[in-house]
């Protein structure tokens, strides 16, 4: 049976109160009614405004059903690749179909942009800068993924760099990390502070029992140092600021 094309009114654009019309193929037979995203393809793949919004809706539905680990296929994959191609054109100073409003829509659903290694590094650096601004230091708790893993990899890369081993840590990247006070070598205090940060993430507080090993003894010692400080003791100011940035309690009551 030949598919019948109809127009459906859909609220698609979260940045606009207007309704958009999108073309779908409707197959009606003995089987239940199904809707299939229809994109007009040509040798030079392109999508008009209606097809962009239809593709956006299809992508959101696909992601909701399959998550981030499944790659789209068919026309939807072509639509995804086309958005990435447009972004690349914009980044190189050209003009494409990808307007700022469209990019905001795609960003709002964590669209899988194909970023270069430098762009991914820049994203993490921006994330670290925000962390530094909020917490006053760059000692992000180490995690298997995310910012904590990235920070650990920068320190690892620096050790390789100092040993004249090949690494992606360029002098420009080192300079940028230095500019925000990145701690390259975690001394004993910083190592224990990072361990305390990880304890805070897991437990929601910094009240480590004193009998619970090295971290508990170290936390107790920080409280002793704080209680014994005087006007002449200035070398603890930075430690106090760092500890208070993660909600450290100086007294247990």
Image: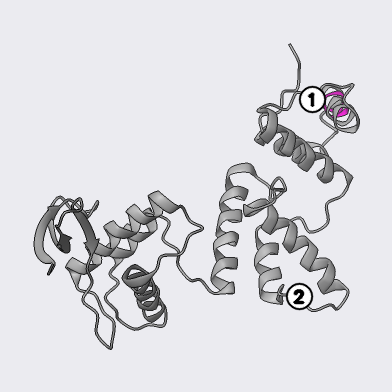
Residue 100, given in percent of the width and then of the height, sits at 30, 66
Horizontal and vertical percent position of residue 11 = 17, 51
In the rendered view, does 178 fall on the left or right side of 116?
A: right
Which residue appears at 59% of the width and 60% of the height?
A: 124
User: How busy is the neighbourhood of tag 2: few (under 14 within 10 Å), some, or many (20 plus)?
Assistant: few
> Does residue 69 appear left or right of residue 3 in this picture?
right
Q: In which quarter of the image is residue 179?
A: bottom right
Q: Which residue is drawn at 39% across and 68% down?
A: 73
- Residue 208, labelled with which disc? 1
- Along the line of sight, the residue nearer the viewer: 234 or 16: 16
Q: How many marks?
A: 2
Q: Is residue 195 among the parts visible in the rendering? A: yes
- Compute the Cα span from label 1 to label 2: 38 Å
Residue at numbered disc 2: 167
Residue at (84, 77) in percent of width and height: 165
User: Could one spot residue 181 in this view of the protein?
Assistant: no
Residue 226 in magenta stretch: no
Q: Which range of residues does the magenta coloring cover? A: 221-225
> Which quadrant is the C terminus positioned in?
top right
Which quadrant is the N terminus positioned in? bottom left
Q: Quadrant of residue 169?
A: bottom right
Q: Position of residue 44 (x, y in %)?
A: 28, 87
In the figure, 115 relative to 240: above or below? below
Q: Earlier in the sequence, mark 1 or mark 2?
A: 2
User: What's the residue at 48%, 60% (across, down)?
Assistant: 70
Image: 71 above or below 164: above
As drawn, the residue found furthest toward the bottom would be 43
Queried whether the magenta region covers residue 223, the answer comes back as yes
């Amino acid at each position: 049976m030949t598919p019948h094309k109809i127009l459906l009114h859909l609220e698609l654009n979260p940045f606009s109160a207007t309704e958009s019309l999108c073309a779908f193929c409707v197959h009606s037979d003995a089987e239940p009614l199904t809707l299939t995203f229809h994109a007009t393809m040509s040798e030079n793949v392109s999508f008009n405004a209606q097809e962009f919004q239809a593709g956006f809706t299809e992508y959101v539905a696909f992601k909701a059903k399959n998550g981030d680990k499944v790659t789209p296929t068919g026309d939807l994959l072509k639509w995804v690749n086309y958005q990435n191609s447009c972004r690349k054109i914009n980044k190189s100073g050209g003009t494409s179909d990808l307007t700022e409003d469209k990019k905001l829509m795609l960003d709002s659903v964590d669209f899988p942009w194909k970023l270069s290694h430098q762009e991914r590094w820049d994203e993490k650096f921006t994330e670290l800068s925000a962390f530094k601004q909020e917490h006053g230091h760059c000692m992000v708790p180490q995690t298997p993924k995310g910012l904590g893993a990235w920070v650990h990899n920068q320190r690892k890369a620096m050790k390789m760099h100092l040993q004249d081993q090949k690494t992606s840590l360029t002098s420009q990247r080192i300079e940028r990390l230095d500019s925000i006070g990145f701690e390259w070598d975690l001394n004993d205090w910083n190592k224990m502070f990072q361990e305390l940060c990880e304890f805070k993430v897991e437990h929601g507080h910094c009240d480590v029992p004193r009998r619970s090993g090295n971290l508990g003894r170290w936390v107790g010692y920080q409280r002793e140092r704080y209680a014994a400080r005087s006007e002449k003791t200035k070398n603890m100011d930075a430690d106090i600021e760092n500890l208070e940035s993660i909600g450290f309690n100086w007294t247990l009551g």
